[in-house]
Image: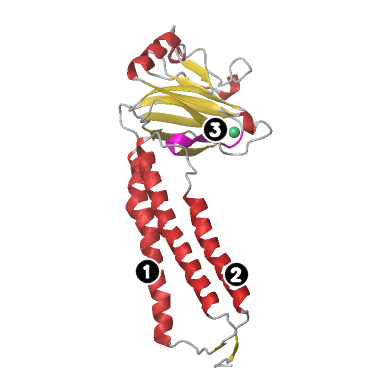
Amino acid sequence: MGKANRPGPFGSTSGIILAAVIGALGVGVFVLGARRYLPPVASRHGIGIDAMLVYLLVTTGTLVVLGHLVLGYFVFRFSRGREVSSSLPGVRAERIWSIVPALIMTVIAEGGVLVIGIPVFSELYTEGPPSDAIVIEVTAEQFTWNVRYPGADGAFGRLDPSLISAENPLGLDPSDPAGVDDIHELALMYVPVNRPVRVRLRAKDVLHSFYLPYHRIKQDAVPGMTIDLWFVPTREGEFDLACAELCGFGHYQMRGFLHVVSEEEFERWLEERRG
Ligand SMILES: [Cu+2]
Protein backbone atom coordinates (compact mmCIF):
# COMPACT_ATOMS: atom_id res chain seq x y z
CA MET A 1 0.00 0.00 0.00
CA GLY A 2 2.95 2.34 -0.54
CA LYS A 3 0.95 4.53 -2.87
CA ALA A 4 -2.68 5.04 -2.00
CA ASN A 5 -4.93 6.41 -4.70
CA ARG A 6 -8.32 6.69 -3.15
CA PRO A 7 -10.79 9.46 -2.48
CA GLY A 8 -10.45 11.46 0.74
CA PRO A 9 -12.70 10.27 3.59
CA PHE A 10 -14.85 13.41 3.74
CA GLY A 11 -17.09 15.23 1.37
CA SER A 12 -16.36 18.91 1.08
CA THR A 13 -19.01 20.19 3.53
CA SER A 14 -18.12 17.87 6.39
CA GLY A 15 -14.46 18.51 5.63
CA ILE A 16 -14.90 22.25 6.00
CA ILE A 17 -16.90 21.83 9.22
CA LEU A 18 -14.27 19.51 10.70
CA ALA A 19 -11.49 21.86 9.65
CA ALA A 20 -13.31 24.81 11.27
CA VAL A 21 -13.89 22.85 14.50
CA ILE A 22 -10.21 21.86 14.72
CA GLY A 23 -9.07 25.44 14.07
CA ALA A 24 -11.56 26.88 16.58
CA LEU A 25 -10.47 24.30 19.17
CA GLY A 26 -6.85 25.42 18.95
CA VAL A 27 -7.69 29.13 19.15
CA GLY A 28 -10.32 28.53 21.88
CA VAL A 29 -7.91 26.63 24.11
CA PHE A 30 -5.41 29.47 23.80
CA VAL A 31 -7.97 32.19 24.53
CA LEU A 32 -9.30 30.30 27.58
CA GLY A 33 -5.79 29.60 28.85
CA ALA A 34 -4.65 33.19 28.35
CA ARG A 35 -7.17 34.67 30.79
CA ARG A 36 -5.80 35.79 34.12
CA TYR A 37 -6.08 32.74 36.35
CA LEU A 38 -3.93 33.99 39.24
CA PRO A 39 -4.75 37.01 41.43
CA PRO A 40 -2.60 40.16 40.96
CA VAL A 41 0.94 39.49 42.18
CA ALA A 42 1.98 41.00 45.55
CA SER A 43 5.51 39.72 46.17
CA ARG A 44 8.93 40.46 44.70
CA HIS A 45 9.78 36.95 43.47
CA GLY A 46 6.18 36.49 42.25
CA ILE A 47 6.96 38.78 39.30
CA GLY A 48 9.57 36.24 38.11
CA ILE A 49 7.20 33.30 38.63
CA ASP A 50 4.54 35.07 36.57
CA ALA A 51 7.06 35.92 33.84
CA MET A 52 7.94 32.22 33.56
CA LEU A 53 4.29 31.16 33.43
CA VAL A 54 3.43 33.77 30.79
CA TYR A 55 6.45 32.80 28.67
CA LEU A 56 5.53 29.09 28.79
CA LEU A 57 1.86 29.81 28.13
CA VAL A 58 2.52 32.07 25.13
CA THR A 59 5.14 29.80 23.52
CA THR A 60 3.34 26.48 24.01
CA GLY A 61 -0.03 28.15 23.32
CA THR A 62 1.27 29.49 20.01
CA LEU A 63 2.38 25.97 19.04
CA VAL A 64 -1.07 24.59 19.94
CA VAL A 65 -2.79 27.21 17.80
CA LEU A 66 -0.39 26.79 14.87
CA GLY A 67 -0.64 22.97 15.06
CA HIS A 68 -4.43 23.09 15.01
CA LEU A 69 -4.56 25.62 12.17
CA VAL A 70 -2.21 23.49 10.03
CA LEU A 71 -4.21 20.35 10.85
CA GLY A 72 -7.45 22.16 10.00
CA TYR A 73 -5.95 23.36 6.72
CA PHE A 74 -4.92 19.83 5.70
CA VAL A 75 -8.36 18.44 6.54
CA PHE A 76 -9.93 21.20 4.46
CA ARG A 77 -7.52 20.81 1.55
CA PHE A 78 -7.60 17.02 1.26
CA SER A 79 -11.20 16.25 2.12
CA ARG A 80 -12.99 17.20 -1.02
CA GLY A 81 -13.36 13.74 -2.46
CA ARG A 82 -10.35 14.32 -4.69
CA GLU A 83 -7.99 11.48 -5.17
CA VAL A 84 -4.84 11.93 -3.15
CA SER A 85 -1.54 10.17 -3.42
CA SER A 86 1.00 9.66 -0.70
CA SER A 87 4.40 8.14 -0.36
CA LEU A 88 6.59 7.34 2.62
CA PRO A 89 8.88 10.23 3.60
CA GLY A 90 12.60 9.87 3.05
CA VAL A 91 15.10 9.35 5.86
CA ARG A 92 16.31 12.94 5.56
CA ALA A 93 12.82 14.40 5.94
CA GLU A 94 12.16 12.15 8.92
CA ARG A 95 15.38 13.29 10.60
CA ILE A 96 14.58 16.95 10.04
CA TRP A 97 11.02 16.54 11.36
CA SER A 98 12.34 14.77 14.45
CA ILE A 99 15.24 17.06 15.29
CA VAL A 100 13.75 20.51 14.56
CA PRO A 101 10.64 20.12 16.80
CA ALA A 102 12.82 18.59 19.56
CA LEU A 103 15.13 21.64 19.38
CA ILE A 104 12.19 24.06 19.42
CA MET A 105 10.65 22.34 22.46
CA THR A 106 14.03 22.34 24.23
CA VAL A 107 14.46 26.08 23.67
CA ILE A 108 10.90 26.70 24.88
CA ALA A 109 11.04 24.53 28.00
CA GLU A 110 14.62 25.25 29.04
CA GLY A 111 14.26 28.92 28.18
CA GLY A 112 11.34 29.12 30.57
CA VAL A 113 12.73 26.99 33.38
CA LEU A 114 16.50 27.59 33.22
CA VAL A 115 16.60 31.21 32.08
CA ILE A 116 13.55 32.66 33.84
CA GLY A 117 12.60 30.18 36.58
CA ILE A 118 15.88 28.91 38.07
CA PRO A 119 17.22 32.34 39.15
CA VAL A 120 13.96 32.96 41.03
CA PHE A 121 13.93 29.51 42.65
CA SER A 122 17.62 29.60 43.57
CA GLU A 123 17.22 32.95 45.37
CA LEU A 124 14.28 31.53 47.31
CA TYR A 125 15.57 28.06 48.06
CA THR A 126 19.37 28.16 48.10
CA GLU A 127 20.28 31.69 49.17
CA GLY A 128 17.72 31.89 51.96
CA PRO A 129 16.23 34.98 53.57
CA PRO A 130 18.27 38.14 54.25
CA SER A 131 19.31 38.69 57.87
CA ASP A 132 16.88 41.58 58.38
CA ALA A 133 13.87 39.33 57.72
CA ILE A 134 10.96 39.30 60.15
CA VAL A 135 10.68 35.79 61.59
CA ILE A 136 7.25 34.27 62.12
CA GLU A 137 6.43 30.73 63.15
CA VAL A 138 3.32 29.20 61.59
CA THR A 139 2.01 25.87 62.88
CA ALA A 140 -0.78 24.35 60.82
CA GLU A 141 -3.36 22.16 62.53
CA GLN A 142 -6.82 20.81 61.78
CA PHE A 143 -8.26 23.37 60.99
CA THR A 144 -6.42 26.61 61.60
CA TRP A 145 -3.07 28.37 61.57
CA ASN A 146 -1.20 29.05 64.83
CA VAL A 147 0.91 32.12 64.23
CA ARG A 148 3.68 33.05 66.67
CA TYR A 149 6.01 36.05 66.82
CA PRO A 150 8.98 36.26 69.17
CA GLY A 151 8.51 38.93 71.85
CA ALA A 152 10.79 41.87 72.57
CA ASP A 153 13.67 39.46 73.33
CA GLY A 154 13.62 38.31 69.69
CA ALA A 155 13.59 34.64 70.75
CA PHE A 156 10.87 32.01 70.55
CA GLY A 157 10.03 30.07 73.70
CA ARG A 158 10.76 26.33 73.73
CA LEU A 159 8.01 23.94 72.64
CA ASP A 160 7.38 20.51 74.14
CA PRO A 161 4.81 18.32 72.38
CA SER A 162 4.01 16.53 75.66
CA LEU A 163 2.63 19.83 77.04
CA ILE A 164 0.09 20.29 74.22
CA SER A 165 -3.46 20.80 75.54
CA ALA A 166 -6.60 22.74 74.61
CA GLU A 167 -5.25 25.79 76.48
CA ASN A 168 -1.69 25.32 75.22
CA PRO A 169 -2.12 24.34 71.57
CA LEU A 170 1.58 24.61 70.72
CA GLY A 171 2.93 22.99 73.91
CA LEU A 172 4.79 26.12 75.05
CA ASP A 173 7.14 25.31 77.92
CA PRO A 174 6.25 27.75 80.79
CA SER A 175 9.67 27.25 82.39
CA ASP A 176 11.43 28.88 79.43
CA PRO A 177 11.62 32.69 79.97
CA ALA A 178 12.05 33.26 76.21
CA GLY A 179 8.44 32.16 75.66
CA VAL A 180 6.79 34.51 78.18
CA ASP A 181 6.53 37.43 75.76
CA ASP A 182 5.82 35.43 72.58
CA ILE A 183 2.86 36.80 70.60
CA HIS A 184 0.19 34.34 69.47
CA GLU A 185 -2.37 34.86 66.72
CA LEU A 186 -4.90 32.59 65.11
CA ALA A 187 -5.07 32.54 61.32
CA LEU A 188 -3.77 36.10 61.21
CA MET A 189 -0.38 37.42 60.16
CA TYR A 190 0.84 41.02 60.20
CA VAL A 191 3.91 41.98 58.18
CA PRO A 192 5.44 45.27 57.03
CA VAL A 193 5.55 45.99 53.30
CA ASN A 194 8.86 45.62 51.41
CA ARG A 195 10.59 43.77 54.28
CA PRO A 196 11.59 40.11 53.84
CA VAL A 197 9.35 37.76 55.82
CA ARG A 198 10.74 34.43 56.97
CA VAL A 199 8.16 31.80 57.91
CA ARG A 200 9.14 28.77 59.97
CA LEU A 201 6.46 26.35 58.90
CA ARG A 202 5.35 23.43 61.06
CA ALA A 203 2.40 21.04 61.20
CA LYS A 204 0.84 19.62 64.34
CA ASP A 205 -1.20 16.71 63.05
CA VAL A 206 -1.37 15.94 59.33
CA LEU A 207 -0.04 17.36 56.06
CA HIS A 208 -1.21 20.88 55.26
CA SER A 209 -0.03 23.37 52.66
CA PHE A 210 0.67 27.02 53.36
CA TYR A 211 -0.70 28.89 50.36
CA LEU A 212 -0.46 32.64 49.76
CA PRO A 213 -1.94 32.92 46.25
CA TYR A 214 -1.19 36.63 45.82
CA HIS A 215 2.42 36.08 46.88
CA ARG A 216 3.02 32.97 44.72
CA ILE A 217 3.96 30.98 47.81
CA LYS A 218 2.86 27.38 48.34
CA GLN A 219 4.70 25.10 50.72
CA ASP A 220 3.69 21.80 52.31
CA ALA A 221 3.65 21.76 56.12
CA VAL A 222 4.89 18.38 57.32
CA PRO A 223 4.50 16.99 60.88
CA GLY A 224 7.91 16.58 62.52
CA MET A 225 9.64 19.07 60.25
CA THR A 226 10.26 22.81 60.40
CA ILE A 227 10.41 24.14 56.85
CA ASP A 228 11.71 27.63 56.15
CA LEU A 229 10.27 29.81 53.45
CA TRP A 230 10.52 33.51 52.74
CA PHE A 231 9.16 36.23 50.52
CA VAL A 232 9.04 40.01 50.23
CA PRO A 233 5.51 41.49 50.15
CA THR A 234 5.37 44.47 47.80
CA ARG A 235 1.81 45.73 48.24
CA GLU A 236 -0.12 46.79 51.33
CA GLY A 237 -3.51 45.20 51.87
CA GLU A 238 -5.33 42.19 53.27
CA PHE A 239 -4.54 38.95 51.46
CA ASP A 240 -5.80 35.38 51.65
CA LEU A 241 -3.96 32.56 53.33
CA ALA A 242 -5.34 29.15 52.39
CA CYS A 243 -4.59 25.50 53.01
CA ALA A 244 -3.79 23.86 49.67
CA GLU A 245 -3.66 20.27 50.91
CA LEU A 246 -6.87 18.34 51.59
CA CYS A 247 -6.38 17.78 55.32
CA GLY A 248 -9.74 16.60 56.62
CA PHE A 249 -13.43 17.55 56.94
CA GLY A 250 -12.70 21.14 57.94
CA HIS A 251 -10.10 21.77 55.22
CA TYR A 252 -12.35 24.35 53.58
CA GLN A 253 -12.45 26.38 56.82
CA MET A 254 -8.69 26.80 56.96
CA ARG A 255 -8.77 30.37 55.78
CA GLY A 256 -6.38 32.90 57.22
CA PHE A 257 -5.37 36.47 56.47
CA LEU A 258 -2.10 38.18 55.78
CA HIS A 259 -2.14 41.89 56.57
CA VAL A 260 0.62 43.77 54.79
CA VAL A 261 0.96 47.21 56.38
CA SER A 262 3.42 50.12 56.57
CA GLU A 263 6.47 49.79 58.81
CA GLU A 264 4.97 52.27 61.33
CA GLU A 265 1.66 50.45 61.47
CA PHE A 266 3.45 47.15 61.96
CA GLU A 267 5.47 48.54 64.88
CA ARG A 268 2.26 49.93 66.39
CA TRP A 269 0.56 46.55 66.06
CA LEU A 270 3.54 44.77 67.65
CA GLU A 271 3.56 47.21 70.60
CA GLU A 272 -0.17 46.69 71.08
CA ARG A 273 0.16 42.92 71.01
CA ARG A 274 3.08 42.97 73.42
CA GLY A 275 0.82 44.87 75.81
CU1 LIG B 1 -5.03 22.05 56.14
Q: Point out the tag, 2 or 1, that comes first from the N-terminus.
A: 2
The span picked out in magenta is 206-216
User: Where is residue 228 shown, x and y percent of the image?
Assistant: 43, 34
Q: Is 221 situated left or right of 267 in this image?
A: right
In the rendered image, residue 198, in percent from the top left (x then y), is placed at 39, 30
Q: Which residue, given by chain and number where applicable, does mark 1 sit on?
A: 103
Q: Local crowd at mark 1 within 10 Å, few (<14), some, or many (≥20)?
A: few
Taking 73 as reference, is 125 left or right? left
- Identify the residue shown where x is 61% and y is 31%: 205
Quadrant for residue 140, please give it.
top right
- Residue visible at 54% across and 26% down in the picture: 256
Q: For mark 2, does the 10 Å Cα neighbourhood hold few (<14), some (14 to 19), or many (20 or more) residues?
A: some
What kind of residue is marked 2?
A: Ile
Q: Is mark 2 within 8 Å of ligand 1?
A: no
Question: Where residue 242 is drawn, which disc sits there?
Answer: 3
Find disc 2 in the rendering and name its residue: 17
